[in-house]
Image: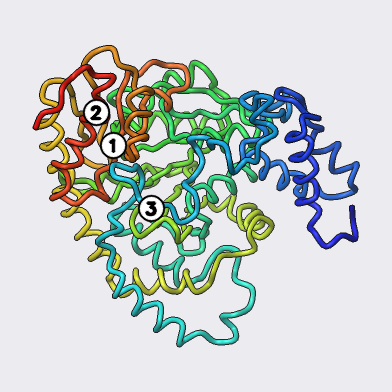
Amino acid sequence: MRGQAEPLYRQIYDRFRRAISSGQLKPGDRLPSVRDLAEEFATARGTVDAAYAMLAGEGYVVSRGPAGTIVSPELNDVAATEPIAGRRVSSAAYPPERAEPKPLQLGLPGLDVFPRKLWAHVVAREARRLSPADMTYPDPAGLRSLREAVAAYLASSRGIACEWRQIVITNGFQGGLNLVLRVLLRRGDRVWIEDPCFPPVRAALEFAGAELTPVEVDTDGMDVSDGVRQAPNARIAVVTPSHQSPLGVSLSLSRRLALLHWANEADAYVVEDDYDSEFRFVGRPLPALKSLDREQRVIYAGTFSKTLFPSLRLGYLVVPDRLLNAVIEASTWQASGHCLMQQRIVAAFLTEGHFGRHLKRMRKLYAARRAALIDALNAKFGKRIEIESQPGGMHLLVRFEGRAKDLDLARLAQAAGFGAEPLSKRAIKHDFGQGLLLGFTNLPQSEAPRIAQSLRRALEPKMGVRSRH
């Protein structure tokens, strides 16, 4: 296979994709281990990892930790012969290229009010300033001016005291999580994950070969004592302490301290996913868990996907000193740096004050959009719903009267063009009831009554109600 123009990892990917599509490999069949395949092709294990990652990302295979990688059991004989593009993708996958935003879609900022003119001005100015030195290979840890700007922002807004050199720029949150797993995790290691959880986190941990320990979330956030009972020697805990995804609760102070104590005693690390803490509508944003970290056990992960826009694919980690060299080395291998122009633009956006003003405007706008959607849903559904709204975040949890399953309600909503998602699919082993997760940040206030009415019509077949005119 060597000597061909196509990269080796792509050739390995194509070989297994054809074998699965032709039925030569069937659902449940085990693939060779990464080590065995790397020896067969006389290549690095990372090459095989890359091929398997592509197969997993497209739904062909799933990782079973120590049991190895198998052909996805969800592929039946017919689906296995169809092109991947023709089949439904996993709910953990990202939207297709250039997908139009859907009403009530989760995780999208208010793209309709993004300051495009200002952004275009900064882009043009930074492009004019581009020098030959800026066109060489970028620093795998990230552009220094952006790292300095992020450190200053975290100090003022999140209470995190860190040096700029501890900041590592990543390919969004997922890229940062993958770096951490590459450095810290061995196949079969135990990892605490919140239950219910953010599906891409679960997928990343499973693909990395982690043994998941689902830790129940209640009104005070992740139950740390439950995690200690189940897996006291876990290697990593992944948490969303400021605004739990998807329940929206905050991790209490006593549990934050208990989590840090456990990590220090167990020689473990906590990955703090601080995905939307900027958007709190009652009081100031809560301090980050990292601000309490005296023993350097927290790896803080932030992203610009929720504060600016997702296609930037820029995030950042705050890395403890003892892990810094290993994380930068992993970043060198994984991505060899990130687009320098985008980093320069975001750095300028932060240092010139545009970012802070944008966040202030979005907080006010999102509070109004949330209130408008809550009012509209209550007006259209009445007592048939219960809305669980937390002091912050970018989505609502709506529970419906009766016995209708949220999976069925979500299918009806999605068929009508809405981005609603079922709560039950976020659960791992605990039961958190039925409900729909509805994003409000990309929904103009004036549209809320119409959207609520359309959603009600879409859900009627399962709710047994008549349309209200």
Of the pair 378 and 258, the residue shown nearer to us: 378
The earlier-in-sequence mark between 2 and 1 is 2
Q: Disc 3 and disc 2: Cα gap in Å?
A: 24 Å
Label 2: element kind: strand
Numbered badge on residue 398: 2
- Determine which residue is flagged by label 3: 100
- Answer yes or no: do the residues labelled 1 and 3 have beta carbons within 8 Å? no
- Determine which residue is flagged by label 1: 438
Residue located 15% across and 33% down the image: 377
Q: In this view, does 413 lie above or below 133?
A: above
- Answer yes or no: do the residues labelled 2 and 1 have beta carbons within 8 Å? yes
Of the pair 266 and 272, the residue shown nearer to us: 272
Residue 222 in view of the camera: yes
| Residue 372: percent from left, percent from top | 13, 43
- Is 469 displayed left or right of 261 in the figure? left
| Amino acid type shown at disc 1 | Leu
Q: In which quarter of the image is the C terminus?
A: top left
Of the pair 25 and 372, the residue shown nearer to us: 25
The earlier-in-sequence mark between 3 and 2 is 3
Which colour scheme appears in the figure?
A: rainbow
| Residue 57: percent from left, percent from top | 61, 41
Residue located 38% across and 45% down the image: 274
Residue located 50% across and 58% down the image: 166
- Is 48 displayed left or right of 193 in the figure? right
| Amino acid type shown at disc 2 | Val
Residue located 65% across and 53% down the image: 330
